[in-house]
DNA sequence: GACCCGTGGGG
DNA sequence: TCCCCAAGGGT
């Protein structure tokens, strides 16, 4: 019974489709008839499969598609990816989130070039050694690209199997065992994709479309009427809110001061405006001008005078997975005296320093988190508006 | 096993 | 507005 894939259900109900052979036949036929036409399904070239699987981690198919197409045009091969710098890679990933995926993809590409002769590992165990490839992705890539008979258990598969066998909260090893017994030995890649696609399109988290399901006749949860509550879902804990004062400092040439975040961790390697965290109630401690001065000193930006606060920009809210951020940006305009003008725009100490004056056209080439992109647009809009007003005034006077 | 790591769409 | 969640991995 243990290895019979649920054919005996509590000794009461014999489920026909729980016979692995019949289950495979029914689901693969359904897959062949309904499979979506996705860009990474054009062929099974390993690099293409690899990139798609990384992009699809915790990401919807519809979201990933445009990124995938652009990526393949820009970095068509492992070598092409290994050749570019990390900033270009992050730029191509901008807006997709979980940026460590992009950094790991890039690291892996270089590792493959330098240690593996430019050839991707061809089995799941070796694939799993690359950064960014875990249990699921190793199985998915190996089965799709190389035809290895291994399972690939993602969130979809977990849900589908939980319902098929009416499991409340199966452990990872239980699922791996169940999934392993079911994999079609002749079409492992198609089988894994069929299972995932069923979960994404039919066996959905809420309101599953059981009437359209090719294997509903063998579904234990359906028989028990428990499909809506399998697997059990846990409440997501409430997340804290963090408030930031954001300093948008403009030099006389109209460039804005930006800093690069540390290479790892949250939004690692992306650019942002200097900011200062407030206290839990969202109150500022010292005065904004004071903070601005202090922060610029920390960043080792040499300025001939203190910036003049010019206007408060609209608040920007952003929800991360484990906290909410509220950014309160203030625009500081840097004015220079006649004497200072001769010195040119304020200089930044070192070239390697992760701090830069960024002109609007340059900002388009930097990888920015979504929130910072919004703040940048707000600041640009204000400055453009002011320039127009100045033009109108001087015209009026002339 | 718990926690960290983004973002956008849908109910 | 809020909550849910989506082809997970690293530490």
Image (tube, coloured by chain):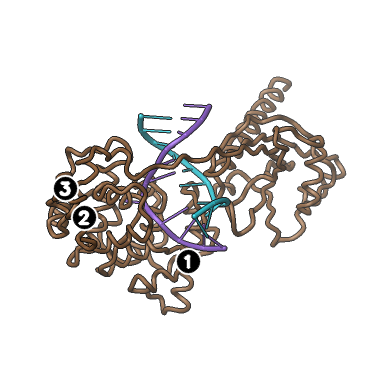
Chain colours: A brown, B cyan, C purple
The 10 Å Cα crowd at callout 3, few under 14, some 14 to 19, many 20 or more, is few
Q: Dot 2: what SS?
A: loop
Q: Residue at x 33, y 64 (%)?
A: A139
The answer for which chain carries disc 2 is A
- The earlier-in-sequence mark between 3 and 2 is 2
Mark identifier at residue A131: 1
Q: Dot 3: what SS?
A: loop
Q: Quadrant of the N terminus of chain A?
A: bottom left
Q: Is residue A92 left or right of residue A349?
A: left
Front-most of residues A198 and A261? A198
- Residue at the far front in the pictured view: A11
Residue A33 picture location, percent across and down? 14, 49
**Residue A128 appears in which quarter of the rendering?**
bottom left
Mark identifier at residue A304: none
Mark identifier at residue A12: 3
Residue A314 picture location, percent across and down? 63, 29
């Amino acid at each position: 019974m243990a290895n019979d894939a649920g054919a005996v259900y509590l000794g009461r109900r014999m489920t026909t489709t729980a016979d692995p052979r019949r289950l495979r036949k029914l689901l693969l036929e359904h897959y062949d008839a309904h499979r979506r036409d996705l860009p990474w399904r054009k062929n099974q070239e390993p690099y293409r499969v690899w990139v798609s699987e990384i992009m699809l981690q915790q990401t919807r198919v519809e979201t990933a598609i445009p990124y995938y197409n652009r990526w393949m045009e820009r970095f068509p091969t492992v070598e092409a990816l290994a050749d570019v710098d990390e900033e270009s890679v992050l730029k191509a990933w901008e807006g997709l989130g979980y940026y460590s995926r992009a950094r790991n993809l890039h690291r892996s590409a270089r590792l493959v070039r330098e240690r593996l002769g430019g050839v991707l590992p061809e089995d799941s165990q070796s694939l799993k050694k690359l950064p960014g490839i875990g249990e699921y992705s190793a199985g998915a890539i190996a089965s799709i690209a190389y035809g290895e008979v291994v399972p690939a258990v993602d969130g979809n598969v977990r849900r589908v199997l939980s319902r098929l066998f009416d499991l409340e909260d199966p452990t990872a090893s239980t699922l791996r065992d169940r999934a392993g017994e079911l994999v079609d030995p002749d079409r492992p890649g198609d089988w894994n994709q069929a299972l995932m696609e069923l979960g994404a399109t039919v066996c959905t988290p809420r309101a599953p479309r059981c009437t359209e399901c090719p294997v509903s006749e063998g579904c234990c949860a359906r028989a028990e009427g428990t499909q809506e509550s399998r697997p059990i879902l846990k409440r997501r804990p409430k997340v804290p809110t963090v408030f930031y004062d954001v300093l948008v400092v403009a030099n006389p040439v109209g460039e804005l001061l930006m800093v690069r975040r540390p290479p790892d961790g949250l939004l690692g390697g992306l650019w942002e405006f200097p900011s200062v965290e407030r206290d839990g109630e969202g109150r500022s401690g010292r005065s904004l001008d004071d903070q601005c001065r202090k922060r610029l000193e920390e960043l080792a930006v040499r300025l001939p005078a203190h910036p003049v606060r010019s206007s408060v920009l609209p608040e920007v809210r952003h929800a991360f997975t484990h906290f909410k951020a509220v950014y309160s940006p203030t625009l500081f305009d840097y004015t220079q005296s006649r004497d200072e003008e001769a010195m040119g725009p304020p200089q930044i100490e070192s070239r390697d320093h992760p701090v830069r004056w960024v002109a609007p056209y340059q900002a388009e080439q930097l990888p920015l988190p979504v929130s910072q992109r919004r703040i940048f647009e707000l600041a640009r809009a204000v400055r453009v508006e002011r320039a127009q007003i100045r033009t109108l005034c001087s015209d009026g006077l002339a």
